[in-house]
Image (cartoon, rainbow, N blue to C red):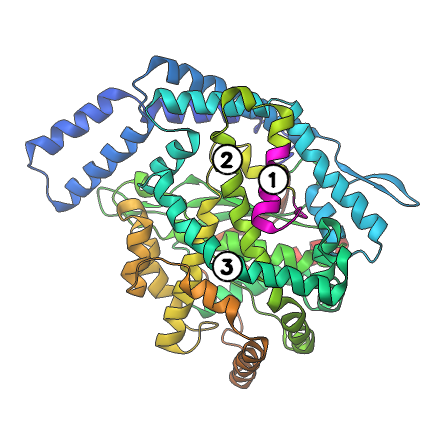
Amino acid sequence: KMGLKGGEFSVEKLNETKGKMEAFLSEEPRLEETCRWLKRDIANEEQTRTLKNFERTFGCYIMSDPGAKELRKDITELEGTLASARGQMKLGALLPGEGFKEMSSVQLRNRMSASASEEERRACYDGMKSIGAFVCANGFPELVKMRNSMARKLGYVDFYDYKVTQAEGFNKARLFEILDKLVDGTRDIVKSAREALTKEKGKDASEPWNLDYMLQGSVTKKLDPFFPFEKAVERWARSYAAMHVGYRGATMTLDLLDRKGKYSNGFCHWPQPAWVRRDGSWQPSVANFTSLADPAAVGSGLTALKTLMHEAGHAAHFANVSQPSPLFSQERPVRTRPTGPSGAVGHLEERIVSGKPYQVFELCRLVAPCYFERALYELPEDEVTVERIQSLAEEVERRIQGGASPRPLLAVPHILADESSCYYHGYVLAEMSAFQTRAYFLEKHGHIVDNPAIGPALTEKYWVPGNSAMFLDLVEGLTGKPLSGEAWVSHLKEPVKETLKRERSDYDEAVKKGPAVSGEIDLDMRVRIVDGDEVITDSQQTGSFGASAEAFERYVRRR
């Protein structure tokens, strides 16, 4: 997935290790032994909790149907083949005056956001659109059929129902009850925003190749000098340190720069989860995460910084899961937002004025993949064809987003991989919880940025439990309210003048206080920063996090 040159990592080895892990977790004698211990009723409270976690985990992997097991193997192989083909795809755009230029999907989207040439933006959109045709021609329809067949053999309605039930503990119908309320509650906001966009910027503003540029293009250029990506590592660390977020001795490898063949989305994974051993000693986590920065591209610094802050939130979550087994680790998106440097305040005000009325478009972009995948796996098998899948994607874009999307649904990489397919709703639920949690903290503390109470609260209530508690229960446990989209919708409805007043007040207060963290940074971690196969810096060798951040900064400037 990462376009590495060495033979240590490959699609074949990924399939092999994944197969071994699933084989271990799906051995029926493990579940049988777990159930025997639970029935004996001699375990203490902690042991019982651990055994119930084993029961749930093994139950998720065990497939009683032999046909489902065989399909699972075939699916893994096809996913690997498709991922490899997608990674080697010659992607790019036929640019005016330049001819075909090879670019990653991230570079294409950055150009669409920043280029003043509509012809160039259109060419980049065509490049993004080509991804859908490519994946459909390289096995995606067959993969959809196989996934559905496996899920139905296991007694589920379809593959989406299988995935959401396994991950969330409730079924597809319950999930879309939650999402439907969010979509229905913002339908009028979406309609008004699209009408306002056309009125303000012209009828072509809503074309997919124009949309992002019309919303942020000029402001993106103005903000670009204030968000150089070489400073991203230091800014992330100071932001998290000010909130007293720690990583409990974790080793983290960061691969932050875009390159050919690299997976086209930020992600974080854990070769070693954190847990408390039987003797009470602590096993720190080992995490790898990635962003896709192109320091030469306008706007790439801010985009990649957002990705870095997001993935660092995932890493902080799993570095702090403190339970008596590594099986208590689970994935749940956690978002932490970056703050800008002081000189950018005027441009940030301009960004609020120009962008706030259209923030609902981001909600639409998040929910659209959920509705696409639901419709995709509900198709009758004889309709799962290249042509129907492509037309379905376009139908959902029009229905949910009001028109074609700058990031076509078939270009969303999550739909291809087992671990992320039928899981985009995780981002929507996380965003709902982020707004709800933010509202709770603001009501309780008055501010979030540089607030040392935030990290400990997130650690205790959200991160330490791992999957010993369900996600909906965690949110209600901290905020005191069931998860809903109320805070998110309220934010979208807030008038621009009120937003400006609030943001300006927060900014002035932060300037008055000054930097919350100065001098050496301590996040209680070892950080390694790499660029593919090349190790840029390692805090174990440099002696400090700050020295490694400086080494990264020098590397990016030379690159």
Q: What residue type is labelled 3?
A: Thr
Q: Which secondary structure lies at badge 2?
A: helix
- Residue visible at 23% across and 47% down in the picture: 280
Q: Which of marks 3 and 1 is nearer the N terminus?
A: 3
The picture places residue 27, in percent across and down from the top left corner, at 29, 21
Q: Earlier in the sequence, mark 1 or mark 2?
A: 2
- Using the image, tell me which numbered label, if any, was put on residue 308: none
Is the residue marked by circle 3 packed among few (<14), some (14-19), or many (20+) residues within 10 Å?
Answer: many
Q: Is residue 236 magenta?
A: no
Which residue of the protein is positioned furthest toward the right in this rendering?
97
Q: Which secondary structure lies at badge 1?
A: helix
Q: Which of marks 3 and 2 is nearer the N terminus?
A: 3
- Residue visible at 44% across and 47% down in the picture: 426
Q: Quadrant of the N terminus?
A: top right
- Using the image, tell me which numbered label, if any, was put on residue 395: 1
- Residue visible at 61% across and 44% down in the picture: 397
Residue 244 in view, yes or no: no
Which residue is labeled 2 in the image?
A: 375
Q: Check the image and report above or below for 90 versus 313.
A: above
Q: What are the residue bounds of the magenta stretch? A: 391-407
Q: Distance between the residues labelled 1 and 2?
A: 10 Å
Q: Which secondary structure lies at badge 3?
A: helix
Most foreground residue, 370 or 286: 370
Residue 276 in view, yes or no: yes
**Does the magenta stretch mainly form a helix, a strand or a loop?**
helix
Is the residue marked by circle 2 packed among few (<14), some (14-19), or many (20+) residues within 10 Å?
Answer: some
The picture places residue 55, in percent across and down from the top left corner, at 23, 33
- Using the image, tell me which numbered label, if any, was put on residue 186: 3
Q: In this view, does 481 lie to the left or right of 273?
A: left
